[in-house]
Image (cartoon, rainbow, N blue to C red):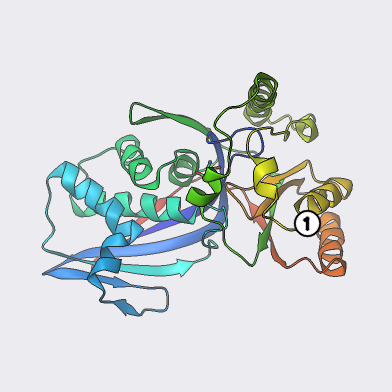
Amino acid sequence: MIKVKVPATSANMGPGFDCFGIALNLYNVVSAYETESGLEILSPEFKVCRNEERNHQNLVYRAMREVFNKAEYEPTGLKIVHGKSEIPRTRGLGSSAACAVAGVLLANEIAGHPFSRRELLNLAVKVEGHSDNATSAMYGGFGASFIKNGVTYFETIPVMEGLMFVLFVPHFTVSTKKSRKSLPQLIPIDDAVNNISHAAMMGMAFATGNFKGLPLLFSDAIHEKHRKDSIPNADFLIKASSKFGAYGTYVSGSGPTLAAVVSEKRLPHYLKLMRNFVEENHIKCDIIPAHVDNRGALIDKKEK
Ligand code: HSE
C-alpha cells in the first residue's frame, strides 16, 4: 500500500495570475495499490464507487493513467482509497491539483519509479490544466511557473517562518473552468504592466524574506475584479482585513476563497477582529488559519 499526503495550495496571490502558488498545511491523503483485477475507488466515507464511468472521471485515477500509459505499465487491477480530506473542494485551494499530484506519485511508485518528480509534475499539469497549484503541491513553498510547449518550467523556494495565511472559505463552490470564461481575452497595456511589476516585486519579497513592502504588492488588474462579483462582500472583507493588519488579501485561485497574508505575531489580534467582523456582518464563511508547507507532497510506502 502506498500513501501520499499532498498539501492545499493557493494560486495567483494577487498579481501572479496562472504563475504563483503557495503550499499550505491542509492535506489530502490518498492511498493506492495494485490488485488482481478491476478498479475500485473508495471515497472519504469509505463508500465504494462501483460506477465505472465515475471511476474513470476520478482525477486521481486519470493522473495515474497518464503515468501508466507513458511508462507502458499495465496494472492487473487497482484500488484507490481517498483518506483524510482537509482541502475544501472547488473553493480555490488546489483540491484538483492535489488529486493530480497524488495520482502521478502513486502510479510512479506502483510502476517502479520510471519518472523523476519533474516529469511527474508535467503529467500532473497535463491532467489539471494549470501549473501554479500543482507546482507548489508537488514541491511545497512559494512557487512560480509557466507552461511552454507542454512543459512546466518552475522555481520553488521555502518560505520563512512567521508568515501565515488566513483563508476565508465561503459555503459555495466556484468552477475554475467556468470562472475563467468571465475573464477578458485582451488586457490593456497598463494592466499588464501593473501585474508584471507587482508580481516581480512579490517574487523578490519571497526570495529575500523582506516582507516590508508586501502591502503594496497584491494589486491585480487581470482577474480579481471579474471574480469578486461572484463573491459576496469580497471588497468589504478585503478592506477590513487590511485595516486589521493583513499584509494583503487576494482571491485564492479562481475563488471563492479569499486568502489574507498575515504576520504570525499579529495573527491572534487579527483573527479576533476578523472573526468579529465576519460575525457582525453576517458573512457566511469558514475562517481557517494556515501555515506554509515547505515540504510538498510526501510518499509513505507500507506493505499491504
Ligand atoms: N490560476 C488559475 C486561475 C487557478 O486563476 O484560473 C489555479 O490553477
Counting from the top left corner in percent of width and height, residue 58 is at 33, 62
Name the residue at 64% across, 52% down. 291
Counting from the top left corner in percent of width and height, residue 294 is at 54, 44
Q: Between 301 and 3, which is closer to the camera in this rendering? A: 3
Question: Which quadrant of the figure has residue 211?
Answer: top right
Name the residue at 76% across, 46% down. 262
Q: Between 121 and 55, which is closer to the camera in this rendering? A: 55
Question: Amino acid type of disc 1?
Answer: Asn
Q: Tell me if 218 is positioned left or right of 271 in this view.
A: left
Q: Tell me if 135 is positioned left or right of 162 in this view.
A: left
Name the residue at 42% across, 79% down. 45
Badge 1 density bin: few <14, some 14–19, many ≥20, Cα 10 Å? some
Q: Split into 4 quadrants, where in the image is the C terminus?
A: bottom left
Q: Tell me if 210 is positioned left or right of 282 in this view.
A: left
Name the residue at 73% across, 68% down. 284
Q: SS for tag 1?
A: loop
| Residue 173 visible, this angle | yes
Q: Tell me if 238 is positioned left or right of 153 in this view.
A: right
Q: How many marks?
A: 1
| Residue 1 visible, this angle | no
Counting from the top left corner in percent of width and height, residue 208 is at 66, 26
Q: Which residue is mark 1?
A: 233
